[in-house]
Image: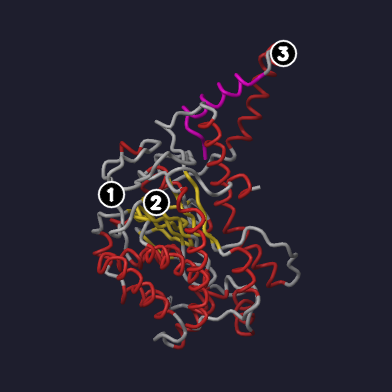
């Protein structure tokens, strides 16, 4: 991974300018060594490589915000970065009362995806936010695709109903076969803090046998649910909003972003393919695993491919836990959380860095997007909710998570809606330090 030459030159020039006059008197080789050291430290926070449609753009440059997003149809939006160069701007998934335009970033996280369902349900019910684009990983990608298809069929009411149908369909109270239920329970258990006897048994077996041994027919309970509910041809034809789905290329170890016009059920399944449960999903002859390993979620498509400067992150994986895991299961679960949050923290760090350069006048908003970053998360309440309960894929459990998500979104809107298009409401430095 390498930073592009223009950015290299810019960083080195800036680092040299910051040197005190007395420091510049040292021998040239020592001065350059100091600059190189500082440059490598900064570069480590900027190297987020995009693949697929974004492979040629190897650096994610970040943001904080712009001055207005699409507040009221009569007001001209002010956008940063190179949004004016986007060849196909979109109007967004827009309710009649929508006043502002945002992009959504949806994390993956097993059963916690039902929390995201609740957040989305409340945002749609409120209606004041138009959705320009959604980037999603794993459960986040499923929520995104289901929302899209439902909207295309019946507007915001159709989207809300389609998400309800999806979570009902994959619950253990739905129509899954016994073997599908077992696999879906294991899929959710990957994220659980506790662990049932059956899960512990499966976990022990998975250490000596792979999905190619335990699931030779590659049964995936989500495939039938998605095929039954989603008209992917309709999703591919959508021009009103943009969709980005992340998966991890097994061979290269890099993230791959699949976009709306190319999506099939395999792309969504690849984004949610946990390698200890399912065989790698092959797309164009290459294998893919869960996108959470390389981008949970991937924010960079929203820097390059959207007009809005506002990004609303729905975060369902805890970054911080004030307890020390002691059992094997607790240690494994915490490792999963750390792994699936690592790339997000790196992206937030890079956003904060470029934002500071913009605010100090060292980068131009004509070339670099200044993002207004926002976040909805369940916080301690969500963590305690799942920790205090046995993991369950029952419909009642999903509905409780949904209600928690609705309440979180309602609270966030009441507190922060007025800031959308004006400033970010997420303290980026606090988020990653």
What element does badge 3 sit on? loop
Q: Position of residue 185 (x, y in %)?
A: 52, 80
* Label 3 crowd (10 A; few <14 / some 14-19 / many >=20): few
Is 128 inside the magenta-drawn segment?
no
Q: Nearer the viewer, residue 350 or 272?
A: 350
Give the dominant element type of the magenta stretch: helix, strand or loop.
Answer: helix
State how many labels appear. 3
Q: Which image quadrant for residue 123?
A: bottom left
Q: In this view, does 413 lie to the left or right of 133?
A: right
Residue at the disc numbered 2: 102
Q: Determine whether the residue tagged by mark 2 lies in a helix, strand or loop.
A: strand
Q: Give the range drawn in magenta.
A: 1-19
Residue 12 counted in the magenta span: yes
**Residue 113 drawn above or below residue 42:** below
Q: Name the residue under label 1.
A: 90
Assess disc 1: are there few (<14), some (14-19) or many (≥20) residues with their C-alpha within 10 Å of its C-alpha. some
Nearer to us of marks 3 and 2 is: 2
Image quadrant of residue 143? bottom left
* Residue name at image x 41 percent, y 47 percent: 302
Q: What element carries label 1?
A: loop
Vertical relation: 55 (above or below) 334: above
In this rendering, the label closer to the viewer, 1 or 2:
2
The spot of residue 128 in percent (x, y) is 37, 57
Q: How crowded is mark 2: few (under 14 residues within 10 Å), some or many (20 or more)?
A: many
Residue that numbered label 3 is attached to: 22
Q: Where is residue 52 in the image (x, y as percent from the top left)?
A: 38, 49
Mark 3 to mark 2 CA distance (whole Å): 48 Å
Q: Which of 99 and 389 is in front in this view?
A: 99
Q: Which of marks 3 and 2 is nearer the N terminus?
A: 3
Image vertical order of residue 133 relative to residue 183, above or below: above
């Amino acid at each position: 991974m390498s930073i592009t030459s223009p950015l290299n030159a810019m960083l080195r020039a800036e680092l040299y300018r910051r040197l005190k006059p007395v420091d510049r008197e040292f021998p040239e080789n020592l001065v350059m060594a100091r600059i190189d050291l500082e440059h490598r430290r900064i570069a480590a926070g900027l190297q987020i490589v995009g693949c697929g449609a974004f492979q040629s753009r190897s650096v994610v440059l970040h943001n904080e915000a712009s001055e207005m997003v699409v507040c009221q149809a009569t007001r001209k939006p002010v956008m940063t970065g190179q949004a004016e160069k986007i060849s196909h701007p979109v109007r967004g998934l827009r309710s009649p009362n929508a006043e502002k335009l945002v992009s959504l970033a949806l994390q993956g996280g097993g059963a916690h995806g039902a929390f995201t369902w609740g957040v989305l349900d409340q945002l749609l019910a409120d209606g004041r936010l138009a959705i320009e684009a959604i980037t999603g990983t794993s459960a986040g990608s499923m929520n995104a695709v289901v929302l899209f298809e439902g909207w295309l069929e019946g507007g915001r009411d159709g989207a809300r109903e389609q998400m309800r149908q999806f979570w009902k369909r994959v619950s253990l109270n739905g129509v899954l076969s016994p073997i599908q239920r077992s696999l879906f329970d294991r899929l959710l258990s990957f994220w659980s803090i506790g662990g049932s006897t059956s899960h512990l048994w499966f976990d022990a077996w998975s250490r000596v046998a792979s999905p190619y041994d335990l699931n030779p027919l590659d049964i995936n309970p989500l495939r039938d649910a998605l095929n039954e509910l989603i008209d992917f041809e309709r999703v591919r034809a959508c021009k009103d909003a943009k969709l980005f789905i992340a998966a991890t290329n097994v061979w290269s170890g890099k993230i791959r972003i699949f976009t709306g016009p190319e999506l099939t059920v395999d792309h969504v399944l690849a984004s949610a393919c946990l390698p200890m449960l399912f065989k790698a999903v092959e797309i164009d002859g290459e294998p893919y695993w869960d996108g959470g390993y390389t981008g949970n979620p991937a924010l960079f498509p929203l820097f390059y491919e959207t007009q809005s400067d506002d990004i609303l992150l729905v975060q369902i994986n805890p970054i911080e836990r004030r307890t020390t895991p002691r059992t094997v299961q607790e240690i494994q679960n915490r490792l999963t959380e750390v792994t699936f949050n690592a790339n997000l923290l790196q992206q937030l760090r890079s956003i904060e860095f470029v934002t500071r350069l913009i605010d100090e006048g060292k980068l131009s908003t004509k070339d670099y997007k200044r993002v207004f970053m926002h976040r909805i998360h369940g916080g301690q309440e969500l963590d305690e909710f799942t920790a205090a309960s046995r993991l369950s894929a029952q419909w009642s459990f999903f509905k409780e998570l949904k209600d928690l998500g609705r309440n979180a979104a309602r609270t966030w809107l009441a507190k922060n809606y007025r800031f959308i298009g004006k400033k970010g409401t997420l303290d980026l430095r606090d988020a990653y330090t």
